[in-house]
Image (cartoon, helix red, strand yellow):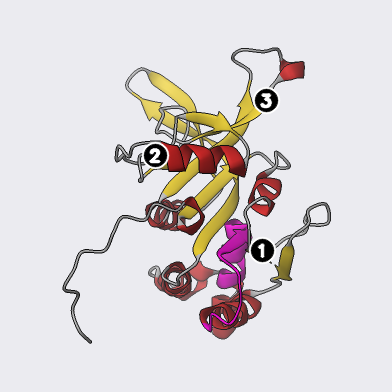
Amino acid sequence: MKLPTEKQPKNQSLISQTVLLYGPNKIGKTELCAQIPDTLFLATEAGHNHVEAFVQPIKNWEDFLKACAEIAKMDHSFKVICIDTVTNLLCFCTDHVCAQHGIQHESDMGYGKGYALVRNEFIRALTKLSMLPVGLWMTAHSTEKAIETRTGTRTRIVPNLPEKMGQFILDLADIVALCSVDRNEKGLNQAERVIYTKPSPDYVAGDRSGRLEAKLPMTYAALAKAFEATTPEPQTQA
């Protein structure tokens, strides 16, 4: 192995980012990802009958590992891999580890050993996939979480993922975007679907590139246009 002698340039392509899109069921996350050119869906749930896309059904963890092995050969023209949904994929990983060790639940091994095995297996596979020369986009549903503050309890919209594994996915992603409905300027009947990309006390979001506006129309074209046109201002995720 030779160490690098030059700095790598900044990644200025939206298509090659690692992205987590999350939001309510049936708001259009899959539809948005289907707009990305040269995308392969690793479909861990139903719901792709109404999009024109390349879809590889993933019914268990073994299917996912086999798909990753084929993707890693780079004998294809796909530029983006979309895991739809990453929540179901984590369930498949958990089932796989439990079956390997003859247990019903991670807690059956005691002292956090089962959780650690699932975490290690999931992180290993997803990290390896994220390091391939393709973009990695993931989807998840949203949920509301009660947050205790000094002034009382409030709710925050977060991805529907277990806390520790959810944090790994949030840290892995260059962009975390909430897909939602904008009711601020129009009535409910005229509400438009939008994407929120900046941190907020009300929801989880972030843009490591600093290229995206805080609120954008919920289309890949709008995301790509903003990403390519904006001067980067690095942001944190929260």
* Distance CA(mark 3)–CA(mark 2): 22 Å
Label 2 crowd bin: few (<14), some (14–19), many (20+), radius 10 Å? many
Q: Name the residue type under label 1.
A: Phe
Label 1 crowd bin: few (<14), some (14–19), many (20+), radius 10 Å? many
Using the image, determine if residue 217 lies above or below residue 133: above
Q: Identify the residue at horizontal 39%, vertical 52% (top origin).
A: 12
Q: Is residue 212 magenta?
A: no
Using the image, determine if residue 196 lies above or below residue 60: above
Using the image, determine if residue 135 lies above or below residue 173: below
Query: For this rendering, which residue is in front, 235 or 93?
Result: 235
Label placed on residue 192: 3
> Residue 137's quadrant in the figure?
bottom right
Is the N terminus in the top left, top right, bottom left or bottom right quadrant? bottom left
- The residue beneath circle 1 is 41
- Write the start and end of the magenta stretch as one range: 73-94
Label placed on residue 211: 2
Q: Name the residue type under label 2.
A: Arg
Query: For this rendering, which residue is in front, 176 or 232?
Result: 232
Which secondary structure, mark 3? Answer: strand
